[in-house]
Amino acid sequence: MIVRHLFIYRLIGLVFSGLVGFPAGVSAQSQHYVHTALWTRLAPSVTIGKHWLLIGDVYYRRQNDLHKGLANLLNAPLVEGVRLGVTYRTGRWSYQLVPLVFFNNHQQLGKDPDFTRPTNPEVRAQSAVEWTYPLTPKTSVSLRGSYEYRHFLTEGVTNLGRLRFRALVRRRLSEQVYLLGWNETLWYAPPNLPNGATKPFDTNRTYLNLGYTISRQVALEGGYQFSHRRRRSLTEYDEEHALTITMLLRL
């Protein structure tokens, strides 16, 4: 049991440290753009039988305008999106298939040319597997790996494959209040990669969140997320500080 706990802590540490999360050798000549944003999410779900769960998500995100300062995180649109899929749970494992995903992506506004770039809508298909392990009666850890294929609807934009790895720790503080912390790393993957990419790193996100269970059907979550993302130019990086708000609905 002790060996297993040490192994799990080591896995979590690798993901939460920069060893996995950030690309090695970022050039001193790289350009970094700092942003603020608001991420909101409505997440309804329906339990079907003992093992199945129908899941959905509605996303709406806003961002700051670089000409108006970082405090104005609601100035410009960032993302509108929807997602529909199914999850199968058995024991400590869950398997997820999300064949219907649509995102309407707006350019992050880090420099003046970004204001003239068109929106970049996309459709995705995703699959994921997750393992959850209880460390103590109040604390659990979840490790998840997923793959998604992104098909962009804007002419001339290359479609991309992407792998995602996430380590999450959940701590119950009381009957109604819980704490979540996670780190997720996203890597470019076959069959398509950005032109000229020699390193697969795409994005790293670190998240800290407080949740409150209102009833058996409704829970609210709010927190902070830091995202470090490499642009397709491969020499520019967006660094985003986001306030996140989520409503979970169990129908």
Image (spheres, rainbow, N blue to C red):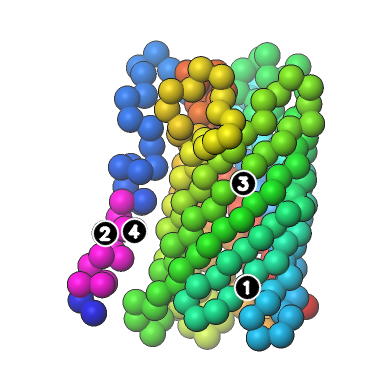
Q: Could you tell me which quadrant the N terminus lies in? A: bottom left
Residue that badge 1 annotates: 88
Where residue 47 appears, x then y in whole percent? 72, 79
* Rendered residue at 51%/48% (across/down): 164
Q: CA distance from mark 1 to mark 4?
A: 24 Å
Q: Name which of mark 3 and mark 1 comes first in the sequence.
A: 1
Q: Which residues are magenta?
A: 3-14
Numbered badge on residue 46: none
How many residues crowd around disc 4 within 10 Å: few (fewer than 14), some, or many (20 or more)? many
Residue 45 sits above or below residue 190 on the image: below
Viewer-nearest of labels 1 and 2? 1
Which residue position is annotated with label 3?
Answer: 148
- Between the residue at mark 4 and the residue at mark 3, the CA separation in whole angstroms equals 22 Å
Separation of disc 4 and disc 2 at Cα?
A: 5 Å
Q: Left or right: where does residue 41 sit relative to residue 242?
A: right
Q: Of the residues under marks 1 and 4, which one precedes in the sequence? A: 4
**Quadrant in the picture for residue 191:** top right
Can you give x and y, in whole percent of width and height, for residue 29 in the image? 39, 13
**Residue type marked 2:** Arg
Are the residues at dot 4 and dot 2 in contact (C-beta closer than 8 Å)? yes
Identity of the residue drawn at 51% across and 17% down: 196
Give how far across and how far down residue 99 sits, in percent: 73, 54
Asked if residue 7 lies in the magenta stretch, the reply is: yes
Mark found first going from the N terminus, 4 or 3? 4
Q: Relative to 101, is 198 on the left or the right?
A: left
Q: Is residue 103 magenta?
A: no
Main SS of the magenta part reads helix
Examine the rendered structure and indicate whether residue 52 appears above or below residue 196: below
Identify residue for label 4.
12
Label 4 amino acid?
A: Ile
| Residue 250 placement (x, y as % from top left) | 72, 76
What residue did someone put label 2 on? 10
